[in-house]
Image (cartoon, rainbow, N blue to C red):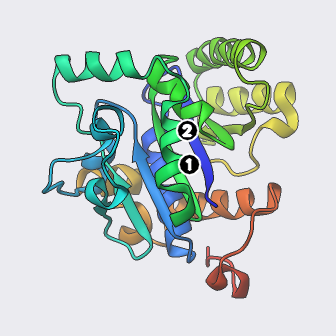
């Protein structure tokens, strides 16, 4: 049965989609059968990976065509073990329809349980940068929620609002919601404000912050612009090794089962 990890944030531009794409890629390369789900109407996963969606089917059908099979709507990724469920919410009317159906906060959770969970080791979801009904669907479906945080002062205010909303969801809807941790992203140790934000977050939230910190790595942007992941493009870059370390940290921190390949040797970060 798949472990479901959702990337969520109220603020855009914090590395949410980039992190979802690269964690899914790291797991797939580690031998795990992985499904990457793009819940965001902006469809950034499609652009980040440069993947065509020839059938034009995807997350819209999860909401609007309830009896459609998983095989009909997934797209094959560029890596072995990686499948994609892409966003295809392309117009306002479709988005309004999806938003209406997603007011049932457990719609995605139920669909995954019935159609996808048994086929994968991991399902990674990229939720919209908001606390909309789509985002809540993504969080309620998750076993673990990761909140990316750019190392900027303004991002701290957004994090506070998100954590308040998260506690409200726990209190009023789902007490079992579990925050995996805060993932610091776009970190540049040469920038004083980045060091200050990193220190403040770690002192305040302690173990809720991942040990892995994703650096501000130009190779990540370059790879994204080319429609490829940085692990494939620049395996030895700081960005690639950061996401591989994140995958390994998740496996260790939450005692997740090792795949046949991963049980022999962790992904090489050298």
Of 196 and 260, the residue lying toward us: 260
Disc 1: CA contacts within 10 A as few (<14), some (14-19) or many (>=20): few
Q: Is residue 12 left or right of residue 204?
A: left
Q: Measuring from the top left, give residue 67's x and y in whole percent.
A: 33, 45
Q: Measuring from the top left, give residue 1's x and y in whole percent.
A: 64, 61
| Marks 1 and 2 close (CB-CB < 8 Å) | yes
| The label number, if any, that marks residue 113 in the structure image | 1
Up/down of 186 relative to 240, above or below: above
Of 12 and 88, the residue lying toward us: 88
Q: In this figure, which residue is indicated by the disc labeled 2?
A: 109
Up/down of 125 relative to 102, above or below: below
At mark 2, the secondary structure is: helix
Of 92 and 156, the residue lying toward us: 92
| The label number, if any, that marks residue 55 in the structure image | none
Q: Measuring from the top left, give residue 189's x and y in whole percent.
A: 63, 42
Q: Measuring from the top left, give residue 261's x and y in whole percent.
A: 62, 84
Q: Is residue 140 left or right of residue 198?
A: left
> Can residue 146 be seen at all in this image of the molecule?
yes
Which residue lies at the image location 31% right of the left edge and 69% below the top edge? 78
Quarter of the figure with the C terminus: bottom right
Disc 1 versus disc 2: distance between alpha carbons? Answer: 6 Å
């Amino acid at each position: 049965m798949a472990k479901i990890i959702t990337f969520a944030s109220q603020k855009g531009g914090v590395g949410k989609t980039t992190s979802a794409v690269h964690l899914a890629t790291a797991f797939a390369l580690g031998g795990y059968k992985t499904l990457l789900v793009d819940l965001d109407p902006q469809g950034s996963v499609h652009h980040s990976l440069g993947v065509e969606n020839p059938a034009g089917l995807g997350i819209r059908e999860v909401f609007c065509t309830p009896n459609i099979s998983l095989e009909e709507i997934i797209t094959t990724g560029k890596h072995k073990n990686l499948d994609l469920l892409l966003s295809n919410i392309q117009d306002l009317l479709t988005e309004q329809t999806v938003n209406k159906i997603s007011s049932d906060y457990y719609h995605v959770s139920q669909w995954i349980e019935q159609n996808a969970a048994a086929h994968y080791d991991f399902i990674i979801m990229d939720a919209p940068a908001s606390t909309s009904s789509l985002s809540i669907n993504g969080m309620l479906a998750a076993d673990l929620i990761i909140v990316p945080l750019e190392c900027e002062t303004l991002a701290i205010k957004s994090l506070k609002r998100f954590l308040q909303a998260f506690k409200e969801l726990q209190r009023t809807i789902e007490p079992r919601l579990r925050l995996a941790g805060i993932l610091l992203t776009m970190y540049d140790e040469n920038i004083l404000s980045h060091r200050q934000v990193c220190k403040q977050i770690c002192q305040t939230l302690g173990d809720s912050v991942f040990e892995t910190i994703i650096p501000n790595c130009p190779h990540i942007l370059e790879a994204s612009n080319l429609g490829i992941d940085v692990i494939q493009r620049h395996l030895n870059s700081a960005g690639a090794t950061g996401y591989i370390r994140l995958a390994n940290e998740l496996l260790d921190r939450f005692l997740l089962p090792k795949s046949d390949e991963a049980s022999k040797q962790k992904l090489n970060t050298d």
